[in-house]
Amino acid sequence: MTDPVIIQAAITGSITDPTANPAVPVTVEENVRDALACWEAGASIIAIHAREDDGRPTQDVTVYRAIVDGVRAAGCDAVLNVSTGSANGNASGAERYACVELGTEMATFDAGSVNLGDEVFQNSVPFLRDLAVACRDHGVKPEIECFDTGHIATALRLRDDGLLADPLHFQFVLGFPGGGQPSTVQLIHMRSLIPAGATWSVCGIGRHQLPLNLVALVEGGHLRTGIEDNIYYHRGQLATNVDLVERLVRIASELGISVATPQQARDILSLH
């Protein structure tokens, strides 16, 4: 790997609850605090979800705006990646991607529907077309989240239809019940399906987070960590977001791989 590795910190999400790990940030102030701490620890991308003060996930653009403005007001130059998810089933349609109007450089683009445990995370092709247009119109780069190989095919079809622009950036999400298997074989297979010039990262769920990040480190990919995906540092030991970022920075250093600054991340991902 010649480029520095990008570390993305996914600090809260819409599923993990503070009752499982008290370090899960909920309020705007807590999200801003963790975003800044992860940036200072070495994360060049911060994944942003919004929650009401009582912990309920929301796609309310005013909450997103408060987090984005708070992070920027503190002088943080990390790339901000806003979620266009369904807020755990509480949002739909254009409400999900109103946050792309906030001037962030990236937004999630879940490239297909998938069973997540007992629930269905719905991302129909008509919705994805509308989301792609919204991202394009606001100059936001989609992070193409793929829970299985068929999602890659859907993204390439939208690219061929002129709705997604090269170079594409993929996030392989592995380990959810109902999604792709969290294995080296699955990760390498998915990487083999993306076009030349595309960049990729991996999101491993739970105990698979660190092993899959290690595979990505040696295979030329980028990394996602944070307590959105994994609440533990070791078995039985709860993590903080900063703990998880600092561990990847340390491991990359041991392997002789430099960690990307926010500006280097922008260059690698063609965020212009």
Image (tube, grey):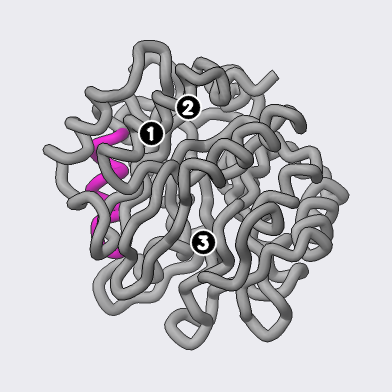
Helix, strand or loop at mark 1: helix
Residue drawn 40% across the image and 24% down it: 156
First along the sequence among labels 3 and 2? 2
Q: Are marks 1 and 2 in contact (CB under 8 Å)?
A: yes
- Region in magenta: 206-216
Badge 1 is on which residue?
A: 154
Q: Nearer the viewer, residue 8 or 245?
A: 8
- Tell me how far mark 3 sits from mark 2, CA to CA: 34 Å
Find residue 103 and report its horizontal and vertical position in percent.
Answer: 79, 38
172 in the magenta segment: no
- Tell me how far mark 1 sits from mark 2, CA to CA: 6 Å
Magenta span: chief secondary structure: helix
Q: Nearer the viewer, mark 1 or mark 3?
A: 1
Q: Name, please, the residue furthest toward the left.
A: 185
- In the rendering, which numbered label is found on residue 241? 3
Residue drawn 38% across the image and 33% down it: 154
Q: Amino acid at mark 3?
A: Asn
Q: Nearer the viewer, residue 127 or 165?
A: 127
Q: Amino acid at mark 2?
A: Leu
Q: Nearer the viewer, residue 191 or 267?
A: 191
Badge 2 is on which residue?
A: 158
208 in the magenta segment: yes
Residue drawn 63% across the image and 37% down it: 106
